[in-house]
Image: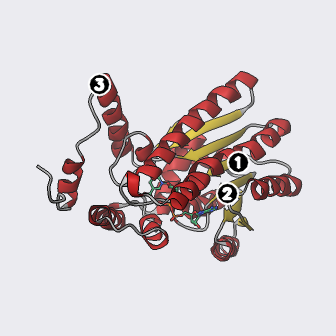
């Protein structure tokens, strides 16, 4: 059976809940899962875009319903979970995808932005797990949870510390979830998604919502945005590849096998050889970003 038919078989019915599904990776996942046959709950803080994505999916013959949701609000998350279980009876696939970025030097990150990013990227995943997992366990049927970490959850990258910290946390949280579910013997598969670059507005949104004055951070984000547009995967293509791996029951989910495996091996080598973090000047040189004055 080809990988595509595994996904087609496993995700041809049932309900998928995807947070942050009104744009980028979440939107790609929503459109692909609906095309496979799932009914998709398009949950996003941007309710207009969530509505538009759901309407598009339905007009293409799929099943989708929009929900306004701020994942950083545990009461709203619990009410979403209660409503979805009331309406559909079960959730076969939960994808904790909502996330934001931030540029800047670690000690210059605005206090409110640090808190907001952690609330969305880390607490938001926890809130979804605490509201959905008990209901998924009670349903008793096989289901699946995939959490969006990043290759930035394996390695560290300069001038985006809150994001990197949050993605390491999501990876740890996902591994802990895997272990705790094994202890209770719940038939819930857990997968950690560690994408490389997939085309989205994540960098431009960060620069719009929380601009930094640091020139190097701005230049790095401009270069990452440029790379994302020029070399990032199309979200639908990435979704197809990632959903196939989830359907096969894998824990590590890649957007691009070669680049994601290379990132994991880099981390492995660093720990095995007890190396310090990568020299960020190599990254700046690769990106064509000038090294700040005063550096050797
Ligand atoms: N794009 C990449 O290359 C890449 C790489 C690795 C990991 N990721 C991760 O993938 C996930 C999706 O990122 P993306 O690139 O598609 O970003 P994006 O900015 O294109 O989309 C994020 C979506 O999340 C929604 N959102 C933001 N805050 C929210 C909140 N509080 N509650 C609910 N929804 C909220 C936004 O409205 C948006 O629709 C993130 O967790 C990101 O860290 C992205």
Q: Does the beta carbon of the residue at mark 2 sit less than 8 Å from ligand 1?
A: yes
Q: Are marks 1 and 3 in contact (CB under 8 Å)?
A: no
**Which numbered dot is residue 127?**
1
**Residue 42 drawn at (x, y percent):** 68, 63
Residue at (68% x, 48% y) in the render? 94
**Which numbered dot is residue 71?**
2
**Residue 62 drawn at (x, y percent):** 69, 66
**Residue 295 drawn at (x, y percent):** 15, 52
Q: Residue furthest right?
A: 86
Residue at (70% x, 56% y) in the render? 38
Residue at (58% x, 58% y) in the render? 116
- Report, in whole angstroms, how far the alpha carbon at label 1 lies from the one at label 3: 35 Å
Asked whether residue 97 is in view, the answer is: no
- Report, in whole angstroms, how far the alpha carbon at label 3 lies from the one at label 2: 37 Å
Asked whether residue 154 is in view, the answer is: yes
Query: Is residue 238 toward the left or the right of residue 45 in the image?
Result: left
Q: Are marks 1 and 2 in contact (CB under 8 Å)?
A: yes
Pick the residue in front: 293 or 287.
293
Residue assigned mark 3? 274
Q: Which of the two labelled residues, at mark 1 and mark 2, occupies the earlier sequence position?
A: 2
Under circle 1, the secondary element is: helix
In the rendered view, tell whether residue 49 sits above or below residue 242: below
């Amino acid at each position: 059976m080809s990988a595509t038919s595994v996904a087609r078989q496993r995700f041809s019915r049932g309900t998928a809940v995807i947070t942050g599904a009104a744009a980028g990776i979440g939107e790609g996942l929503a459109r692909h899962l609906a095309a496979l046959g799932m009914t998709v709950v398009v949950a996003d803080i941007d309710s207009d875009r969530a509505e538009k994505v759901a309407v598009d999916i339905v007009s293409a013959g799929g099943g989708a319903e929009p929900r306004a949701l701020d994942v950083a609000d545990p009461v709203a998350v619990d009410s979403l979970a209660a409503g979805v279980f009331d309406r559909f009876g079960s959730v076969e696939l939960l994808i904790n995808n909502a996330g934001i970025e931030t540029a800047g030097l670690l000690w210059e990150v605005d206090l409110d932005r640090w808190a907001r990013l952690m609330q969305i990227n880390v607490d938001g995943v926890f809130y979804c797990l605490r509201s959905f997992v008990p209901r998924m366990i009670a349903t008793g049927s096989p289901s699946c949870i995939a959490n969006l970490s990043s290759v930035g959850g394996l390695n560290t990258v300069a001038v985006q510390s809150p994001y990197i910290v949050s993605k390491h946390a999501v990876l740890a949280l996902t591994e802990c979830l895997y272990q705790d579910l094994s202890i209770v013997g719940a038939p819930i598969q857990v997968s950690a998604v560690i994408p490389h670059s997939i085309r989205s507005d994540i960098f431009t949104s960060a620069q719009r919502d929380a601009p930094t004055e640091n020139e190097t951070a701005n230049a790095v984000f401009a270069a990452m945005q440029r790379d994302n547009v020029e070399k990032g995967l199309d979200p639908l293509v990435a979704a197809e590849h990632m959903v196939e791996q989830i359907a096969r029951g894998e824990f590590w989910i890649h957007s691009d096998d070669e680049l994601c495996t290379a990132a994991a091996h880099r981390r492995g080598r660093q720990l095995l050889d007890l190396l310090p973090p990568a020299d960020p000047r190599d990254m700046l040189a690769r990106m064509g970003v000038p090294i700040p004055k005063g550096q050797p």
